Amino acid sequence: MMAKRELDLVPRVEAVRDEKKIQPPVHFSLAEILQHYSESYAAIRNQFVVADQMLQEGNEEACKMIWRSQVVLAEGLLDFYIHELSKFCMFQMFAGQWNKSDKYNQFMVPMAKVEECLAATF
């Protein structure tokens, strides 16, 4: 005979987690953004040495795997670079250092995020 399972609904426990303080965004200078990009790009390029070694040893599959990973990493690096440049430009416009573009003026931000930012203390 099977034991009877309890299937009644019970109230959910709420507000038991510790609140985490919101960290302010990190702003990099143009020089820092370029440095991060250049260092990461160099690390990706350095994998050609490993790929060449694998090819010379006859391990073509390993070589191709490294090449594929280089493409994926390079795409991710380009995405991150564009993101950081966009963030830099948006901040410059927000801070009044640059003229605001049409795209800046049309940028949509959810009100929940606005409230979250206003409530954060830095």
Image: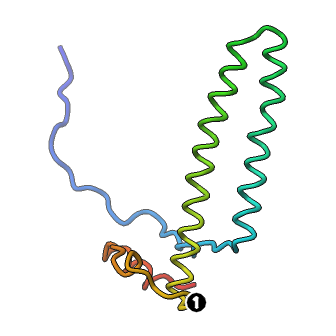
Q: Is residue 16 left or right of residue 9?
A: right
User: Where does label 1 land, which residue?
Assistant: 97
- Image coords of residue 104 (percent x, y): 41, 78
* Left or right of residue 109: residue 25: right
15 or 29: nearer the viewer: 29
Q: Residue at x 53, y 68 (%)?
A: 86
Q: How many marks?
A: 1
Residue 47 vertical placement versus 38 (above, below): above
Local packing at callout 1 (Cα closer than 10 Å; few below 14, some 14-19, many 20+) is few
Quarter containing the C terminus: bottom right
State the image quarter where residue 45 is shown: top right
Seen from this angle, which residue lies furthest left?
8
Residue 52 lies, in percent from the top left, at 81, 22
User: Looking at the picture, which amino acid does disc 1 mark?
Assistant: Gln
Q: Going 56% across and 60% down the picture, which residue do you hit?
A: 82
Front residue (pair 18, 63): 63
x and y percentages locating residue 30 in the rendered image: 69, 72
Quarter in which the N terminus is drawn: top left
Residue at image coords 50%, 88%:
99
* SS for callout 1: loop
| Relative side of 80 to 112, left or right | right
How far from the left and from the top, in percent, is residue 5?
Answer: 20, 30
- In the image: residue 110, left or right of residue 116: left
Looking at the rendering, which quadrant does residue 29 occupy?
bottom right
Residue occupying the far bottom of the picture = 96
